[in-house]
Image: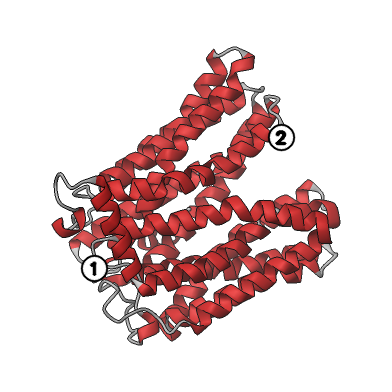
Amino acid sequence: MPVIGLRALHGYLEAPPDSTPVERHNFHHAFREAALIGVINAAIAFLPVFVARLGGTNLEVSLVTALPSLTGVLLAIPLGGFMQTRRNIIPWYARGRLGSQLAFGLVALASLLLPGRLVIPWILAIYGIATVFATMTNVSFNVVMDATAGTRGRFELMSRRWSIMGVATAGSLALVGTVLGWLPFPLNYQVVFTGFALTGVWAYQFGSRIQVPDHPSSARGTAGEAFSARVRSMVARVLAERPFLAFEGRRLVYAMSAMLTLPLIPLYYVRVLDAPDQWIGLMGTVQALMLLVGYAIWRWQARLRGAGFVLAMATFGAALYPAALSLTHGIASAAVLAGLGAVFTSGVNLAIFDRLMTTVPRGYGVTFNSIDTTIVYLAGVVAPVLGALLADWIGIGGALRVSAVIGLAGATLFALDRGPRPDSAPATHLEGVVDAESVAPEA
């Protein structure tokens, strides 16, 4: 049985049998990078806890959560414009990933060497710089994965990549929690963060070897072109892409709902359901497992019915989750809803990525993805604050229902979308899917 399991795992990590040599190479490296990134993702959960245990104020702990969105709003478009002028995106994608992960090693070093009063300010400064590198990766991620997908399609690649990451993150969280309990504070966090940084170096070995085509010279601009001329050219190109602008309008509405819900759900668990920590941890585990189930279901549905069907059904289902949660007062039923919500969320992840990339013109992926990243980060800055205000005004349950209404509005807009232009997507469609809505189009 172990041999059969290992063979099945090996097959899952490999490209489909009829892939080209480059596609096989890219699948190999993208999946192995995903496993290591999944391990490192656990650090995101523990960094604010570390700052709190060091005696950080509410503002300092909140900054750990807010800094990525603030940096993204400010720098995503400028960084996208810069990377669009580079010959190939992979070095910038890989270096951005490496820079953001090495920061955890610097956090460990700062807590080890600096006097107590300086530790938290230095950690925030290090993490602030790391978010610049992370924004570089986030801007380039969709472009890299779109090129990596090749002729097999984005659902095929991303459902498997995100499943691998989910398993790795769940295992990493369990292992890290155990290590933190074994060692004294702050040595436990210093050891764990150093391990994350070393894992980041290992992941870089895979991410940096993904092979994607160079940007066409026309997309990189003219050497010596004035900055103002580049900005005008970019604005004109974006405004000319009506499918992209229409998608981003829908995307903003839906992202506002998702980001508004983000701080409300843990508040509902604690203040309304009075859920103990063990149950909250269990619900997180249920969500992680059901995400894996969801990726398999939606990949199958995309092959069967097309990407447009997945987009409509997943966005409607995920939008209804906060409203359903607001109507339950049992912890067990909340855990069941968390699992169902995760199934629909996995479909949203796949379908949004797919539809976005069908609206991006060839050769300009970095520029257009930087705009998309900025919009998502903007929602991440505004919506949680709005959610807190609504919770104070109409209660947490009422705020969850408002979030559901906004999400349903966004889902309706997606359902009314007739699909991208037939000529907008690269030739990366799902095997066996030929209708216009399913023409295949990134943490």
Say which quarter of the image contains residue 213: bottom left
Side of 246 where 260 appears, left or right: right
Front residue of 266/233: it is: 233
Residue 195 at least partly seen: no
Residue 381 at least partly seen: yes
Say which quarter of the image contains residue 182: top right
Q: Does residue 112 lie above or below 280 as drawn?
A: above
Q: Of the numbered discs in the image, which one, if any, rests on residue 232?
A: none
Residue 24 placement (x, y as % from top left): 25, 60
What residue would you read off at disc 2?
58
At label 2, counting other C-alpha atoms closer than 10 Å, the crowd grade (few under 14, some 14-19, many 20 or more) is: few
Instruction: Give, as a three-letter code, the residue at label 2.
Output: Asn
Q: Is mark 1 on a helix, strand or loop?
A: loop
Instruction: Give, as a three-letter code, the residue at label 1.
Output: Ser
Q: Residue at x 51, y 52 (%)?
A: 377
What residue would you read off at disc 1?
19
Side of 401 where 191 appears, left or right: left
Observer-side mark, 2 or 1, equals 2
Q: Earlier in the sequence, mark 2 or mark 1?
A: 1
Front residue of 281/255: it is: 255
Q: Which residue is drawn at 29% across and 72% down?
A: 428
Q: What element carries label 2?
A: helix
Residue 414 placement (x, y as % from top left): 51, 77
Residue 407 placement (x, y as % from top left): 62, 70
Side of 235 where 195 appears, left or right: right
Side of 149 where 184 appears, left or right: right
Q: Does residue 7 lie above or below 136 as drawn?
A: below
Front residue of 161/18: it is: 161
Q: How far apart are marks 2 and 1 (CA)?
A: 51 Å
